[in-house]
Image (cartoon, helix red, strand yellow):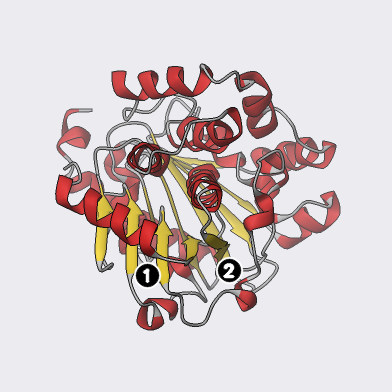
Amino acid sequence: MSVPEPQWRQAVHQLTSAERVALACHVMPDGDALGSMLALGAALRSQGTQVVASWGGSPFEVPASYAYLPFLDLLVRPEDFPEVPELLVTLDCAHPRRLGSLQGRLATAGCTVVMDHHAAGTRYGDLNLVDEQAAATVVLVSELLDRLEVPLTAELAIPLYTGLVTDTGSFRHRSTTPAVHQLAARLLSTGIRHDLITRSIYDTAPFGRVQLLGRVCARARLEPEAVGGLGLVWTVVDLEDLASTGLRLADVEGVVDVLRSTQEAEVAAVLKASPDDGGWVVSTRSRDAVDVGAVCSALGGGGHFSAAGFSATGEPAHVLARLRDALADAAHVSPRARTA
């Protein structure tokens, strides 16, 4: 459902009236979370607004694949985020818990605006700019920038394109519509180097990642009977894998996209050990028959129909058992699964 016009007008009024705006996205931000937050922050700053941006999770570091993004100077550590924001805008964050340590700012903010496109969103803001049909949160941000009459420059187009290309899976997901390509064309018309952007995101990694891929893919397991007979492929990235290759958690996000190519499995999953809390960050991908976004939301996380994740504690076998049960339930109720 698209955002009603009165809500757009109210958002413009709030953003143009505020002297200081605090932006927050979900923990472990991806390209859409970073892209939407940085683009909006830069646009507001260009109009004279004081802006800070952050996320409430550890580690607080921009993944190397997004180091090319402009406007990184907007970022402040979560401990330096305003305690009582005049205006708080959350981006690409479907549930308050995904704000991590910044969740408490929802209670202290003078006004909260939520900008999101997840189907499982709870609309927890005073003002909710939520469109479940939008391919990415940057789609909403680009429309807001037009309403704020901010000129689209090449520098602004870079984070917007980043969010668009990552949340559509390089324009491979079902969310890729004619409108998505029209927005991409508009962004490309500013002269940005889309090849350099996608090369940094998908085709640039330390040699340690190549070594880790060989290691964790070699121990991947295929369970054809899982997901209601549609198949599950999974593997584990443990702390020793990270230590021996010198990689950070953010460096191994792409492992699940390698597993998802498995022909015999509807769902791919990777359990990644978190050095910070001893738990697991679980990434999932589906082909087209099971809504892993709903599955991960039920497990305390969230995401999209074909790409989602959640955090968990305990032994890998216990985490996998919970995931298998949730996937089995999802396959049972999914019309697509019954006709796959």
Residue 195 percent location from the top left of the image: 64, 19
145 w.r.t. 44: above or below: above
Q: CA distance from mark 2 to mark 1?
A: 13 Å
Kindly indicate the quadrant of the structure image that contains residue 148. Answer: top left
Q: Secondary structure at mark 2?
A: loop
Task: Decide which of 305, 321 is in the foreground and name it.
Answer: 305
Q: Give the residue number, with chain letter if any, for mark 1.
A: 96
Residue 57, numbered circle: 2
Kindly indicate the quadrant of the structure image that contains residue 299. Answer: bottom left
Residue 102 percent location from the top left of the image: 49, 74
Horizontally, is 233 left or right of 12 in the view?
A: right
125 w.r.t. 172: above or below: below
Residue 117 percent location from the top left of the image: 31, 47
Can I make out residue 120 in this image?
no
Kindly indicate the quadrant of the structure image that contains residue 301. Answer: bottom left
119 w.r.t. 273: above or below: above
Q: Are marks 2 and 1 in contact (CB under 8 Å)?
A: no
Q: Secondary structure at mark 1?
A: helix
Horizontally, is 93 left or right of 158 in the view?
A: left
Can I make out residue 20 in this image?
yes
